[in-house]
Image (cartoon, rainbow, N blue to C red):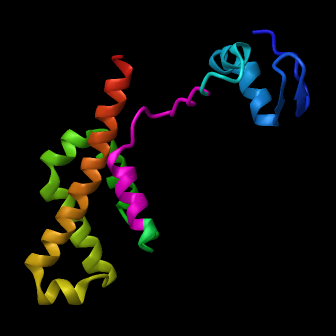
């Protein structure tokens, strides 16, 4: 790589304007440098994720955060999220009952959904189970897509 850019602005070599981030990518990532060497007709390469696919614990955590649930001091949620990530989608499917019990336990301790669960416990448990399975399914689909692209 022979990127000579030092400041954001117009790059004479690649005939385009570059931001700080674009300069950094051009200097450190051969795929970006080669892309800009070919000219503007090629689509830009996608940056690689640190983890090749979405992990089930992270998906569940993000969805719960989106709904307004947060980790509390002394809450085992972060450890459980890590376990789910280590198990992957397949391992989480095998342990769906355990994961469902985790969420039910947390719901009871924080009085979240307690009224609903006490009135219709089966429906509440099934809804939580489906919510978790949807997170696992999203992780599995993302993993399958990653593997499909990787094997092209």
Q: Nearer the viewer, residue 117 or 82?
A: 117
* The quadrant where residue 130 appears: bottom left
* Residue found at x 16% / y 47%: 93
**Which quarter of the figure is the C terminus placed in?**
top left
In this rendering, the answer to whether 96 lies above or below 128 is above
Asked if residue 71 can be seen in this view, the reply is no
In this rendering, the answer to whether 42 lies above or below 55 is above
Specify the segment rendered in magenta: 44-64
Q: Position of residue 105 (x, y in %)?
A: 23, 71
* Residue found at x 33% / y 43%: 85
Q: Position of residue 47 (x, y in %)?
A: 57, 30
Q: Position of residue 86 (x, y in %)?
A: 31, 39
* The quadrant where residue 31 appears: top right
Would residue 1 appear left or right of 116 to someone viewing this image? Answer: right
**Which quarter of the figure is the N terminus placed in?**
top right
Q: Is 2 part of what is drawn in magenta?
A: no
In this rendering, the answer to whether 83 lies above or below 75 is above
* The quadrant where residue 88 appears: top left
Residue lying at the far front of the rendered structure? 41
Q: Position of residue 117 (x, y in %)?
A: 17, 83
């Amino acid at each position: 790589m022979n990127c000579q850019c030092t400041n954001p602005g117009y790059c004479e070599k690649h005939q385009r304007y570059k931001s700080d981030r674009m300069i950094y990518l051009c200097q450190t990532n051969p795929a970006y440098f080669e892309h800009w060497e070919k000219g503007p007709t090629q689509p830009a390469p996608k940056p690689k994720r640190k983890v090749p696919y979405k992990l089930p614990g992270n998906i569940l955590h993000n969805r719960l955060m989106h709904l307004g649930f947060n980790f509390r001091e002394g809450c085992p949620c972060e450890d459980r999220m890590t376990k789910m990530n280590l198990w992957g989608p397949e391992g989480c499917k095998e342990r769906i009952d355990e994961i469902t019990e985790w969420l039910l336990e947390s719901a009871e301790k924080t009085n979240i959904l307690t009224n609903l669960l006490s009135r219709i416990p089966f429906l509440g448990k099934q809804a939580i189970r489906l919510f978790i399975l949807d997170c696992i399914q999203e992780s599995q689909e993302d993993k399958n897509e990653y593997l499909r692209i990787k094997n092209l």
